[in-house]
Amino acid sequence: MATKGKNTADADQTNSQSADPSSAKIEAIKNLIFGENILQYDSEFDSIKNDILAKKKALETLIEEVRSELIQNIDNLSTDLNIRITELESNIENKLDDMDEKKVDRRHLGQLLVSLGEKIGKE
């Protein structure tokens, strides 16, 4: 691996020397300091970058799944709430109807009592 890195560094240095003498010196210094490790670093950075991108995509997928599930749960709760409200309204109406049937109007009660009194008085 050292030979491969050295050959790559030599090729980079040759290319740089033809382009600009000062950049060739910089490349030579860079190769002396980092040597073959620069390729390893680049490989590790690419690996980390790919890992981050994969995890980002997985998180985006998970967020979308959670969003869909939340929307479904909200719809279910809304439907359940509407059903319960309708049942409560129906129960209240039934109770009010029962109360109306059980409640006797005072005038009507008075007339019934007078009529009963008259019947008792006739006998």
Image (spheres, grey):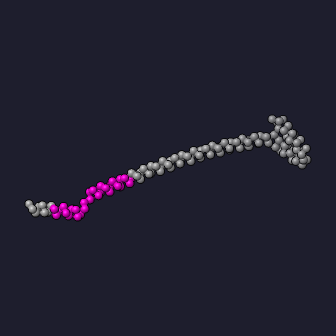
Which of 79/35 is in front? 79
Q: Residue at x 19, y 63 (%)?
A: 111
Specify the quadrant of the image occupied by residue 28: top right
Please provide percent x and percent y for residue 4.
Answer: 83, 36
Viewport quadrant of the N terminus: top right
Please provide percent x and percent y for residue 96.
Answer: 32, 57
Please provide percent x and percent y for residue 43.
Answer: 75, 40
Specify the quadrant of the image occupied by residue 98: bottom left
Which of 116/65 is in front? 116
* 2 relative position to 112: left or right: right
Say above or below: 40 vs 88: above
Viewport quadrant of the C terminus: bottom left
Q: Residue at x 87, y 39 (%)?
A: 11
Q: Residue at x 35, y 53 (%)?
A: 91
Q: Main secondary structure of the magenta part?
A: helix
Please provide percent x and percent y for residue 44.
Answer: 74, 41
Magenta span: 88-115
Can residue 56 be seen from the camera position used here? yes
* 16 relative position to 104: left or right: right
Specify the quadrant of the image occupied by residue 106: bottom left
* 18 relative position to 77: left or right: right
Q: Residue at the left extreme?
A: 123
Q: Is residue 77 magenta?
A: no
Can residue 25 be seen from the camera position used here? no
Instruction: Say how many tags the image has.
Output: 0
* 65 relative position to 49: left or right: left
Which of 87/19 is in front? 87
Q: Residue at x 66, y 42 (%)?
A: 54
